[in-house]
Amino acid sequence: MARLELILPKMGESVAEATITSWLKQVGDSIEADEAVLEIATDKVDSEVPAPEDGVLSEILFNEGDVVKVGEVIAIMETEGGEDSPVAARAESSRAPVSAAPVPEGTNGSVAAVESRVQEAVEAIAPRGSNGRFYSPLVRNIAKKEGISMSELESVAGSGKDGRVTKKDILAYIPTRGSEASSSTPSPSPTKAPAPAVESSRAKPAPKVHDAPAVQLQGGDEIIEMDRMRKLIADHMVMSKSVSPHVTSYVEADVTGIVEWRNRIKNSFQDREGEKMTFTPIFLEAIVKAIKDFPMVNVSVDGDRIIKRKHINMGMATALPSGNLIVPVIKDADNLNLTGLAKAVNDLAARARENQLTPDEIQGGTYTVTNVGTFGNVMGTPIINQPQCAILAVGAIRKKPSVIETPEGDFIGIRHKMFLSHAYDHRVIDGALGGSFVRRVADYLESFDTEREF
């Protein structure tokens, strides 16, 4: 029997880690090639990891709930064959203690090189503190960015499995660092001179952290536990509101020409392309044009730096049958014509509802659109999808009486109108830019060429 490693596969350019949600096989179980061994989750996408060959599961290296980096060994299988796989041999070496013996002569440093690689592998596989507690790459990256040392990180209370520090824990800890440090500092000796009054006047109190109010249960109440996706959405929304000062600008657009054009071509479009022409790709086309006119809405904030995005990757918020929300991304949307946008929208929306998206298909968005009109809402105040800096909500299209200006005079007519709600990060997008952008989107919608071919 040969030993074969099962590694966490690469799931997209921007996906570096995943959480093990459940093991579908246990030690001793026989597994056929391509049979699912475990389920993993990356952000909001769940997927399965299949076995590369027939064999028996002999060792499980991570528990459910553990965060694993792409490329790490997660299990060992025994397969038919006479030799261990090269990857399995490296894994065994990484789990063995590293020898400090001198390099024998004539080896050209090969042993030292192997030991160096083994040590790197050990550090990558087991990122733990001196207290033995595991810290996920995400938590360690946040700590590094905030200047939190490992010794300080070890003092943070963890609410995760086995006391593990979660993203929510460390984000909640960061605002309290100043107050905790001051409360733990010994009071100054009476012999020391007091600080100058001007200095004390400059001191700013640490921001107060408000805990959620206690909820009192009443007779007949039903308790529903949040599922994993709902917890992710909740954390992401709270984080976005705390990070970005939201401002929303509103514009009403006359889309009568678009409605009439779509009604005229939708049957022939479906006959030719096998796809439905919805309003969403038409909206996306106008938004992409406006982003080209105002590229500073297509940005992200990294500390004191503004990252101006080269690509226009359009996220489209999609409601799932479970009631949760996911945002698949159309990469380089500016390279697609209206037909291409229609096909991309239909494909991503359908596969999102069937839980068939890949992790990479919900990553890398630079601007997001949410269609609140789908639910009959006329406008909304959307929350920015971090680390983006703006999001546009499109409302329901309604028939309304409107003043129509003509060379012969003004008169009242029935028009199809809709509201556009543009929420943006006021740290980097001011009202002039945010308001001008949404007005430009409305201009493109109102000037839609009703004689165009699809």
Image: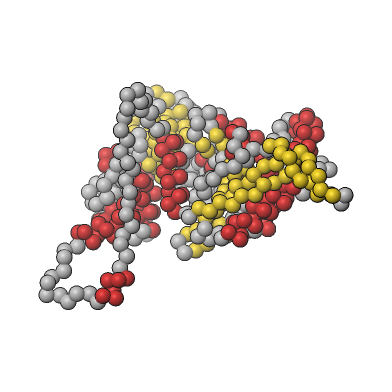
Q: Nearer the viewer, residue 391 or 331?
A: 391
Q: Residue furthest right?
A: 408
Q: Image point 60% across, 47% down: which residue?
A: 421
Q: Quadrant of the N terminus?
A: top left
Q: Residue at x 61, y 39 (%)?
A: 378
Asked whether, in this view, residue 125 is left or right of residue 386, the answer is left
Q: Is residue 58 above or below residue 179?
A: above
Q: Foreground residue, 115 or 24?
A: 24
Q: Is 315 placed left or right of 416 in the picture?
A: left
Q: Is residue 264 visible?
A: yes
Q: Where residue 255 sits: x, y (%)?
A: 73, 42
The quarter of the displayed image where residue 393 is located: top right
Which quadrant of the figure contains the C terminus?
top right
The residue drawn where x is 65% and y is 35% is 346
Question: Looking at the picture, how far across and down is residue 8, in whole percent?
Answer: 43, 39
Location of residue 63 in the rendering, given as x and y in whole percent from the top left corner: 33, 35
Q: Is residue 221 above or below residue 411?
A: above
User: What residue do we see at 71% from left, 32% from top?
Assistant: 276
Q: Nearer the viewer, residue 439 or 181?
A: 439
